[in-house]
Image (cartoon, rainbow, N blue to C red):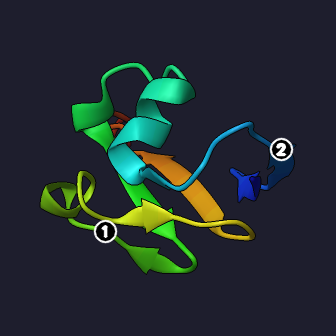
Amino acid sequence: MNLVISGKAETLVLKEKTVLELLKVKNVEMPEMVSVELNGEILRQSEYGTTLVKDGDQVEFLYFMGGGSSI
């Protein structure tokens, strides 16, 4: 399966997988803290287990971090 993951073309030896399975295959730490964009659409975490990733899809793993300082 050919995917673009976080801007990089990757070939994975997978049949169709769910987004949740892809997170596991990619060893994403703290998947509950990651937002996933699939082909330009942000998914709800409740959809990760049922949304299939297909050949040619573009996937972004988005990590939101707090912090900063006020001046």
Above or below 16: residue 20: above
Amino acid type indicated by mark 1: Leu
Q: Secondary structure at mark 1?
A: loop
Amino acid type indicated by mark 2: Thr
The residue carrying pointer 2 sits among few (fewer than 14), some (14 to 19) or many (20 or more) residues within 10 Å by Cα, namely few
> How many numbered circles does the render carry?
2
The residue carrying pointer 1 sits among few (fewer than 14), some (14 to 19) or many (20 or more) residues within 10 Å by Cα, namely some
- Where is residue 63, by image quadrant? top left
- Residue at the front extreme, as displayed: 15
**Residue pointed to by mark 2:** 11
Labelled disc at residue 35: none
Q: Is the C-beta separation of discs 2 and 1 under 8 Å?
A: no
- Residue 22 picture location, percent across and down: 49, 40
The residue located at (21%, 65%) in the rendering is 44
C-alpha distance separating marks 2 and 1: 22 Å
Horizontal relation, residue 52 to residue 58: left or right: left
The residue located at (78%, 55%) in the rendering is 7
- Residue at the left extreme, as displayed: 46
- Residue 54 picture location, percent across and down: 59, 66
The residue located at (34%, 43%) in the rendering is 20
**Residue pointed to by mark 1:** 43
* Camera-nearest residue between 40 and 64: 40
Q: The C terminus lies in which quarter of the figure?
A: top left
- Residue 26 picture location, percent across and down: 57, 28
Q: Secondary structure at mark 2?
A: strand
The residue located at (19%, 55%) in the rendering is 45
Q: Is tag 2's residue or tag 1's residue first in the polypeptide sequence? A: 2
Horizontal relation, residue 11 to residue 30: left or right: right
- Residue at the bottom extreme, as displayed: 40
Above or below 67: residue 71: below
- Residue 41 picture location, percent across and down: 44, 80
Please identify, in this view, whether the residue under mark 2 or under mark 1 is nearer the observer. Answer: 2
